[in-house]
């Protein structure tokens, strides 16, 4: 695909070569993300970061990624602080705000809303999550993490064995990840969820049509038995009609160190898009996993900055100029 000026709305836009390109550029961002070097390649550029749903990682890492490339970030968070609360349409908001930015990242509770916004925008738009539909940059950083973690163990993505656990009905991260895995070969996927929160049938069909082996289970211990990656997700409480309805499912699948030791292969990598729900009635990934070297959740979150830097560099067509505009850092940067 031609990245220059492109909207990033769905994983469906990508072919395998595009993924390789994003990952190659992401790798090259490491000295900047690790604060060994600074670059001013996007000096003067403005990111409009518009988040109409709660977000910590996605919003801050998009912002940090843009800042790390030398650009400025303008934020709009929540409907109440935006003119949408006064009845303004997405069309008008897009026409106006795209006049103030070079690129826009947007999260919105309705599926399809970011694409609608992008159609009216004068600058490229990146989907930071639209309802239950998609979260393409998360899927890219998830796959980037899977690839890195497997490479450390001498494996590659083709042939991957992965369990996706939790709320597979409403979880947009796993929806985008399934679509992304369709670009690879011979994937074994075990979908562990309550039947009411199962992966949408069309995504299961898509994976099977791609030649993947898809198993469906309600049993966590069975699901995590023979996988390279155990990918846990949060019950998407905000998508249920009431908290009580979500409470029925909360805490159904809890992974802790004892269960990991008993049921997982020794090198199984644990992932989660975060936030993990650590309240006592949920505790989907127990804190006693924190010292487990295979808990990759914070490496995964760190990788988000690299992948988002890569997306900006490609969309704004500066991937080949980043180093030319760089220098060493002149402050203490002993981050561990
Ligand atoms: C996810 C999301 O918003 O879809 N969070 C994220 O962006 N890392 C997952 C979630 O909220 O459960």
Image (spheres, grey):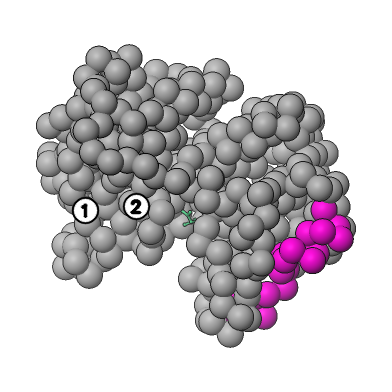
**Depicted 300 relative to depicted 324: above or below:** below
- Picture coordinates of residue 102 (x, y %)? 19, 34
The label number, if any, that marks residue 34 in the structure image: none
Q: Is ligand 1 closer than 8 angstroms to the Cβ of mark 1?
A: no
Q: Which mark is residue 59?
A: 2
Q: Quadrant of the N terminus?
A: top left
Where's residue 3, x and y in %? 38, 22
Q: CA distance from mark 1 to mark 2?
A: 9 Å
Image quadrant where residue 32 sits: top left
Does dot 2 land on a helix, a strand or a loop?
helix
Asked if 242 appears above or below 222 in the picture, the reply is below
Most foreground residue, 122 or 103: 103
Numbered tag placed on residue 75 in the rendering: 1
**Is any part of residue 72 visible from this angle?**
yes
Q: Answer with left or right where residue 231 lies relative to residue 41.
A: right
Whether residue 123 is visible to the viewer of this picture, yes or no, is no
Residue 92: give x, y in percent of width and height.
18, 50
Q: Secondary structure beneath disc 1?
A: strand
* Towards the viewer: 16 or 260: 260
In the rendered image of this protein, does residue 243 appear above or below residue 240?
below
Q: Is residue 23 left or right of residue 207?
A: left
Q: Residue at x 41, y 54 (%)?
A: 57
Q: Position of residue 308 (x, y in %)?
A: 39, 37
Q: Which residue corresponds to the image point at 29% horizontal and 20% vertical from the top-left? A: 322
The crowding category of the residue bearing disc 2, from other C-alpha atoms within 10 Å (few below 14, some 14 to 19, many at least 20), is many
The residue lying at 75 percent from left, 47 percent from top is 268
Q: In the rendered structure, which segment of residues is drawn in magenta?
A: 245-264
As for residue 260 lying within the magenta part, the answer is: yes
Q: Are marks 1 and 2 in contact (CB under 8 Å)?
A: yes
Task: Using the image, determine if residue 205 lies above or below residue 262.
Answer: above
């Amino acid at each position: 695909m031609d990245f220059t000026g492109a909207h990033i709305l769905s994983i469906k836009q990508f072919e395998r070569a595009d993924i390789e390109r994003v990952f190659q550029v992401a790798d090259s961002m490491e000295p900047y993300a690790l604060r060994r070097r600074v670059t001013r390649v996007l000096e003067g550029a403005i990111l409009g970061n518009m988040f109409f749903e709660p977000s910590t990682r996605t919003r801050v890492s998009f912002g940090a990624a843009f800042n790390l490339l030398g650009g400025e970030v303008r934020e709009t968070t929540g409907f109440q602080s935006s003119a949408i609360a006064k009845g303004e349409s997405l069309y008008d908001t897009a026409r106006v705000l795209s006049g103030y930015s070079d690129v826009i990242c947007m999260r919105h509770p309705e599926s399809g809303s970011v694409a609608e916004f992008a159609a009216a925008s004068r600058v490229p738009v990146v989907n930071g999550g639209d309802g239950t539909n998609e979260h393409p940059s998360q899927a890219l950083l998830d796959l980037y993490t899977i690839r890195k973690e497997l490479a450390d163990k001498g494996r590659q993505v083709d042939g991957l064995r992965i369990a996706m656990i939790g709320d597979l009905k409403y979880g947009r991260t796993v929806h985008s990840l399934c679509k992304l895995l369709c670009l690879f070969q011979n994937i074994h996927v075990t979908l562990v969820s309550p039947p009411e929160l199962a992966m949408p049938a069309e995504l299961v069909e898509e994976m099977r049509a791609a030649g993947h082996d898809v198993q469906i289970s309600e049993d966590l211990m069975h699901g995590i038995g023979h996988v390279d990656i155990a990918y846990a997700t949060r019950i998407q409480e905000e998508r249920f009609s009431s908290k009580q309805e979500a409470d029925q499912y909360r805490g159904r699948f809890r992974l802790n160190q004892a269960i990991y030791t008993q049921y997982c292969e020794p090198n199984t990598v644990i992932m989660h898009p975060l936030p993990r729900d650590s309240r006592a009635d949920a505790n989907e990934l127990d804190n006693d996993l924190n010292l487990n070297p295979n808990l990759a959740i914070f490496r995964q979150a760190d990788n988000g900055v690299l992948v988002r830097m890569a997306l900006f560099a490609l969309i704004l067509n500066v991937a080949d100029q980043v180093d030319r505009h760089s220098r060493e850092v002149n402050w203490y940067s002993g981050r561990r």
